[in-house]
Every structure is written in structure tokens, then in C-alpha cells.
Image (cartoon, helix red, strand yellow):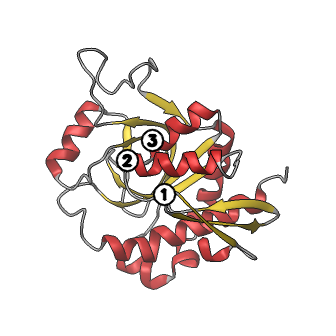
């Protein structure tokens, strides 16, 4: 996506390179969040405070948790939770202290639009990824899932960890390392937020296999195609 912004301008803030440009008539600021909840929270805060964005759309990869969430599928988050947050006995497990909640919802309208764009793209995966990538990663009929995504500062890469998450959070669709932090920052600022994650693995003992290649050949291409569709159809303000 970063290379698709015509007439982009680059600006460095908080050690990150932000790219400003226009896409289908919408003014955008694009940036890599970096890895982990703290890094993602910093990035989201800079987007809001310095660049004045009025909505945030987050894309990336995740490990699938729920049954039926397969490699190559896409998850549109309807809520986020920090699976590694535990301030008990002062607060319930997963509850963010002083917020009275563990889950932070995404914006319904933005998420609806993102899910619709994802379904349009995944209807013909070969046209986005090419037939070689579809064969290599066995992406026969990728699906779009909507629901809870959980975040934590650990790359979940064993069957035991994945099983423990499913037991503790049976409605979680996928696990990643940033989204809950961005959701909380957007909640604090009242900024609408939506997120899309491509499932790169099943968050188990094979989670590390070909991860970098999957990001290059599948996740990044899905993200760019979905956002292309999303911004093409998004009403101009």
C-alpha cells in the first residue's frame, strides 16, 4: 500500500516514517505500526495528535484460533482484548484497570465497509495473489470472519499456547500483537477504528513456517487490494 500513494510526502516522527498522499480522492497518512502493543499505541497516538487523522484502519497478519479460521482467511475485528493483561485480584483477568472493561469495540460502519471490501477481494483470490501463490499456500476458498481478535506481547507459536487461549477466550477468532492497543488509544480519543487481519498460520507449532514469504505473497497483497476496494467505495467527506 505504501507505494500506491500518488504524490506522497514523507515525514519522520517518533522514529517512524509517515507517508502522506491521496487515494481515490481521500487524504491518507500511511505508516508501519511496528511490532507489539506499546509500539502500536505510540504510532496511533502520533497519527491522531500530530497528523489529526479522523479515523484509523489497521491491516496486518494474525494467527487463527477458532475452528474454521484457516490460513489465507481474513478476520475483520469487531472487538479487541489484551489476552496477556491480568491485574487480578484488583481487577478481573483481562480487564483494563480503571476502564471497567476488557473489550474495546471497533467502529461498526467502518468495519462493515471493510468486511464488504474483503469479501469482494477474496471472492477471486487468484486475481489478487496470482495462481502460483494460491497453489503454494493452498488457498482454495478463503473466507471472511468477523468477531473478537486478541492481542498480546508474545508471538503465539505452540499448540499448547493456542489451546490455552481457546479455553480462556472461546469466542476469539485470531491472535496478534497490536490491535488491542490501537483500539484502546482510539477509544480514548474518540476516533473511529477498524482492523483487518490475514490469517498467516494457526498459532501453533508450525506458526513460524514461511511467515515472511506469506506476508510478502499473501497478506500484504490482500491488504492493498482490500484497501483499494474500500477507498474506492468510501464516500468522500
What element does badge 2 sit on?
strand
User: In the image, is residue 196 above or below residue 97?
Assistant: below
What separation in Å lies between label 3 and label 2 (alpha carbons)?
15 Å
Residue at the extreme right of the image, as rendered = 237
| Mark sitting earlier along the chain (2/1) | 1
- Marks 1/3: CA–CA distance: 11 Å
| Residue identified by numbered label 1 | 33
Task: Tell me the quarter of the image containing the N terminus.
Answer: bottom right
Is 134 or 181 nearer to us in this picture? 181
Residue identifier under label 3: 181
Residue wearing tag 2: 174
Examine the rendering and report whether any part of residue 195 can be seen: no
Q: Are marks 2 and 1 in contact (CB under 8 Å)?
A: no
Which one is in front, 83 or 31? Answer: 31
Residue at the far left: name it: 160
Regarding mark 1 in the picture, which secondary structure is present there? Answer: loop
Image-based side of 111 in relation to 133, left or right: right
Separation (CA) of disc 2 from disc 1: 19 Å
Q: Residue at x 53, y 67 (%)?
A: 222
Ranked by sequence position, the earlier of labels 3 and 2 is 2
Q: Is 4 placed above or below 62 here? A: below
Pointers 3 and 2 in contact (C-beta within 8 Å): no
Q: Earlier in the sequence, mark 1 or mark 3?
A: 1
Frontmost of labels 2 and 1 is 1
Closer mark to the observer between disc 3 and disc 2: 3
**Would you call the spot at circle 2 few (<14 residues within 10 Å), some (14-19), or many (20 or more)?**
many
Q: Is residue 99 visible?
A: yes
Image: 122 above or below 78: below
Q: Position of residue 199 (x, y in %)?
A: 40, 58
Residue at the location (29% across, 74% down)?
210
- Residue 96: % across, % down: 39, 26
Report the label total.
Answer: 3
Amino acid at each position: 500500500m505504501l507505494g500506491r500513494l500518488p504524490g506522497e510526502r514523507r515525514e519522520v516522527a517518533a522514529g517512524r516514517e509517515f507517508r502522506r498522499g491521496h487515494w481515490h480522492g481521500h487524504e491518507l497518512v500511511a505508516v508501519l505500526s511496528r511490532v507489539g502493543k506499546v509500539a502500536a499505541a505510540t504510532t496511533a497516538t502520533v497519527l491522531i495528535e500530530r497528523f489529526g487523522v479522523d479515523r484509523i484502519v489497521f491491516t496486518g497478519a494474525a494467527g487463527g484460533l477458532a475452528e474454521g479460521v484457516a490460513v489465507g482467511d481474513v478476520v475483520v475485528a469487531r472487538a479487541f482484548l489484551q489476552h496477556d493483561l491480568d491485574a487480578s485480584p484488583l481487577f478481573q483477568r483481562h480487564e483494563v484497570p480503571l476502564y471497567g472493561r476488557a473489550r474495546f469495540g471497533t467502529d461498526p460502519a467502518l468495519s462493515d465497509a471493510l468486511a464488504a471490501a474483503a469479501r469482494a477481494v477474496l471472492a477471486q483470490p487468484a486475481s489478487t495473489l496470482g495462481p502460483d501463490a494460491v497453489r503454494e499456500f493452498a488457498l482454495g476458498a478463503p473466507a471472511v470472519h468477523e468477531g473478537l481478535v486478541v492481542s498480546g506481547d508474545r508471538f503465539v507459536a505452540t499448540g499448547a499456547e493456542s489451546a490455552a487461549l481457546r479455553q480462556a477466550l472461546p469466542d476469539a477468532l485470531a491472535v496478534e500483537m497490536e490491535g488491542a492497543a490501537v483500539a484502546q488509544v482510539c477509544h480514548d480519543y474518540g476516533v473511529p477504528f477498524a482492523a483487518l487481519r490475514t490469517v498467516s498460520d494457526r498459532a501453533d507449532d508450525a506458526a513460524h513456517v514461511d511467515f515472511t514469504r506469506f506476508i510478502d505473497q499473501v497478506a500484504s497483497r490482500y491488504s492493498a487490494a482490500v484497501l483499494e476496494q474500500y477507498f474506492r467505495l468510501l464516500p468522500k467527506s
